Image (cartoon, rainbow, N blue to C red):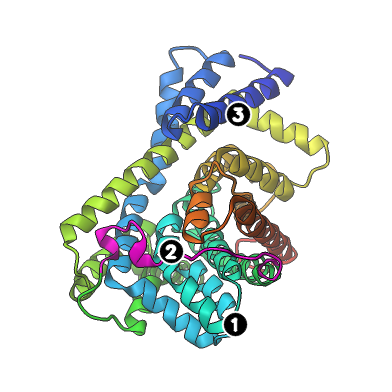
Amino acid sequence: MVTGNMLIVIFILSLAVLFFLILKLKLEPFLSLVGVAVMTAVAIGMPLKDVPGVVTTGFGNTLAGVGILIGLGVIFGQFLAASGAIEKIAQSVLKAFGIKRSPAGLALTGTAVSIPVFFDAAFVILSGLIKSLSKRTGISIITFVTALGVGLIVSHSMIAPTPGPLVVAENTKSDLGLFILYGIICSIPATLVGGYLYGMFIGKRLNHSGEVAEIQEADTSSANSEPKKEISAALSLGMLSLPIVLILANTLSKLIFPDTMISTFFGFIGDKNIALFISVIAAVVVLSPYIKASKESLYSEAINSAGIIILITGAGGAFGAVINKSGIGDYLIATMQSWSIPVLLLAFIFSQILRASLGSATVALVTTSSIMGPLALDLGVSPVLLGLAICAGGVGLSLPNDSGFWVVNKFGKLTIPQTLKAWTIGGFIAGLTALGMVYVLSLFAGILPGI
């Protein structure tokens, strides 16, 4: 097999081919990732008889950790949206923050909502708030667009059980409860700095023209149709927090009641798959009176959405498995370490490059964590901190090759330059802030659990 500097050359070429296939030829990312994984394996001199096994094992191992959870997460988000729980949560947070601080409230609302609901759907659902808030407060629409978009993408990239962070936690072998807790701690400052403060700054410097699309004007699915009756704020917040509470209960029970029946019980219901399954069943039963759309249509839409996410996630794992098997990851890390680049910064840069180039935070997180995750102990860094640094790199630099770029552009009625200045730069600032919080946590190594 190839060794030394040629590994770096092949690695760079494999990324270049991947970018070319996705960006220029518009080939589906799933097909691109599988194809590049196979080509990379052949290029490094891996025995041909071993190539299919390495690719399929990498694909399967990745989905063994997150495949069920992705499907359950999409269904859960679909029922929350259809019941009106998402809108009720938004109204409650905005009421708590007041009119003048409503951009901060909207940003934090986005951070909460995007935990169970994928970015694109969440932005469409909540975008109806933007125009009315701007009219009531006199604050620029661009400020609200930035606040909402950044709030959503921060939790989409930082807080499990969203698929990207979930895969990162799995690949770095981090305790999921602690990963969620520290992810939230990093996300709140990132959201406020990149979404609220920068949103206020840029909103005063750009003149918005055009009307923001109301939610009724959007091409929405039955998941967004008018509910039968209005859901309460308490029930909405309770349903949103249920899977997170169950998973965190598992972690806390291990710390407080180790090796007891209590920890065994919470270890079962707090397992990530069981916790979200319980939450989905609870959502199906409890939210039914508030949902006008048929359950069959919600299941169908959720499964259709989950399918491509699962395929891309598995394919990213396959590509990462080839990289690890070849030794490219080890050699790349060793080479960059000789350049005196701190490990956490290296993880951030690696993830950020893939995020900007491929246009997918999930693919960037899966690929980077597949390469660097298994090396956490060898690098002498906390798996949780390494994973959070990778997640921080997936937050910003959304470019026109990212579907989220066009969702923000379309529903915010921004020009492309305005989208770049508000959304792309705002996300980048949020990512840097999240990385800064990771370094703050690292100061407490040996004091905080898992750090």
Q: Secondary structure at mark 2?
A: loop
The residue that mark 2 highlights is: 213
Q: Secondary structure at mark 1?
A: loop
Location of residue 189 in the rendering, given as x and y in whole percent from the top left corner: 65, 70
Q: Give the residues drawn in magenta, as a range.
A: 202-225
Tell which tag, 3 or 1, sits nearer the viewer. Answer: 1
In the image, is residue 360 part of the stretch drawn in magenta?
Answer: no
Q: Position of residue 157 (x, y in %)?
A: 54, 55
Three-letter code for the amino acid on which mark 2 is drawn: Ala
For the residue pair 334 and 255, the one nearer the viewer reads as: 334
Residue 141 place in picture, x, y as percent: 56, 70
In the rendered image, the vertical position of residue 266 relative to residue 426, given as above or below: below
> Mark 3 is on which residue type?
Leu
Residue placed under numbered mark 3 in the picture: 15
Crowdedness of circle 1 by 10 Å Cα count: few (<14), some, many (20+)? some
Q: Write down the residue under mark 1.
A: 101
Q: Main secondary structure of the magenta part?
A: loop
- Is 233 positioned to the left or the right of 444 in the image? left
Pointer 1 or 2: first along the chain: 1
In the displayed structure, does residue 354 sit left or right of residue 339? left
Separation of residues labelled 1 and 2 (CA atoms): 23 Å
Q: Is residue 223 magenta?
A: yes
In the image, 60 versus 304, the foreground residue is 304
